[in-house]
Image (cartoon, grey):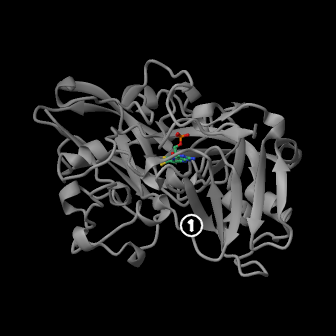
Amino acid sequence: MPGLTAPSDYAEEPPRHPALKINSKEPFNAEPHRSALVTSYITPVDFFYKRNHGPIPKVEDLSRYSVCISGLVNKPIQLSMADIWALPKYNVTATLQCAGNRRTAMSKVRKVRGVGWDISALGNATWGGAKLSDVLELVGIPKLSSVTSLGGKHVEFVSVDKCKEEKGGPYTASIPLKQATDPDADVLLAYEMNGEVLNRDHGYPLRVVVPGVIGARSVKWLDSIKITEEECQGFFTQKDYKMFPPTVDWDNINWSTRRPQMDFPVQSAICTLEDVDVIKEGKARIAGYALSGGGRGIERVDISVDGGKTWVEAHRYQKDGVPYVSDGPQSDKWAWVLFEATLDIPANAEIVAKAVDAAANVQPENVEDMEPERNPQHILASDQDTEFVMRWKI
Ligand code: MTE
């Protein structure tokens, strides 16, 4: 029996924490409650969102598991877990976020399809594993390469899960070779999450983690890696997670005109408020998360209690005892920033939080103003691309 196999039904799913909110049972898609999300900088594994497209693969015998690296390389190889463990180990704290995060709010304003998500389809973990740039050196690709001697420009990750979008085939995704071979991009083949062995839901025994990029590129249950000339031609790269202009004709869509989305946009969300009716006049603690893609830090989080007429700056933090400085050397560049402010809530308050990143990108004010039209099947690219602010009225 091979090391890694994919069941064709849901009879052998792993156990999950009962506190998760289930958005779809089969495949299993779930997120924590928003108030639980920001109680800690590092998200406990049990409360980390789970985003799947098929039954969870399993490993019968880890000693038989291996990752094959082939394609446009001179020395294809087969790596066992022992080979991966033997490489230098790095711990990278990075926020993984599904491109569909906050789709439910968007669907109240625009017609969207796909699994609904509240604001918790993200989590911040410390991933332990080998750097992809070190792994690729084993097949003769030097660090900081844009193209291999055989013309390879992309690194494609292939899993084993059976996804209906791929007509029962596996989940795939790719990233540019330049990013994969850049040690500072911190792309990992991770076998640990928060200091524990990766669990089945999150990709055991080995997954890719591409920091600063939509979660769709962080392939779980890694089976093989191919060095290719073109980017991945699979569904999740070519027919999903793309941004189109408002003029798009959804009945005659030409997917090839748009590039797959990579970095996620700047955004923030308030996690301490559940509903319009929970907030009352008086003092209230407003807290949540803010993050931006591509390793850009969070320069500011502004909060307004009067619908955006006046703003106060929230306190931002990551690690205990370490002041957060956007893009500072002690900050975790790939990780979210938590924010908080205790404010006097007036009568007729409208509470809004808005993040600004280190490149001066600002969160759009509302979903109606957002430029791109949705992909009606998987709105993901565009809802991620412009994360509008959240508003509460009392
Ligand atoms: N990898 C495989 N093999 N199958 C999947 O369904 N989902 C992707 C990505 N990697 C997926 C995958 C998506 S869309 C996201 S957002 C993240 O995994 C979710 O990772 P998590 O479940 O560990 O939070």
Q: Answer whether residue 346 is visible to the viewer in this image.
A: yes
Question: Is residue 95 or residue 57 the one in the foreground?
Answer: 57
Looking at the rendering, which quadrant does residue 138 occupy? bottom right
Quadrant occupied by the N terminus: top right
Compared with residue 330, is residue 240 higher up or lower down, i.e. above or below? below
* Outermost residue toward the left in this view: 348
Compared with residue 219, is residue 348 higher up or lower down, i.e. above or below? above
User: In the image, residue 23 lies at what x, y percent?
Assistant: 35, 33
User: In the image, residue 366 lies at what x, y percent?
Assistant: 22, 55
User: In the image, residue 330 lies at what x, y percent?
Assistant: 66, 48
* Outermost residue toward the top in this view: 18
The answer to whether 230 appears left or right of 17 in the picture is: right
Q: Residue at x 21, y 26 (%)?
A: 279
SS label for mark 1: loop
Compared with residue 287, is residue 210 higher up or lower down, i.e. above or below? below
Looking at the rendering, which quadrant does residue 32 occupy? top left
Q: Residue at x 83, y 54 (%)?
A: 78
Question: Is residue 185 or residue 230 the one in the foreground?
Answer: 230
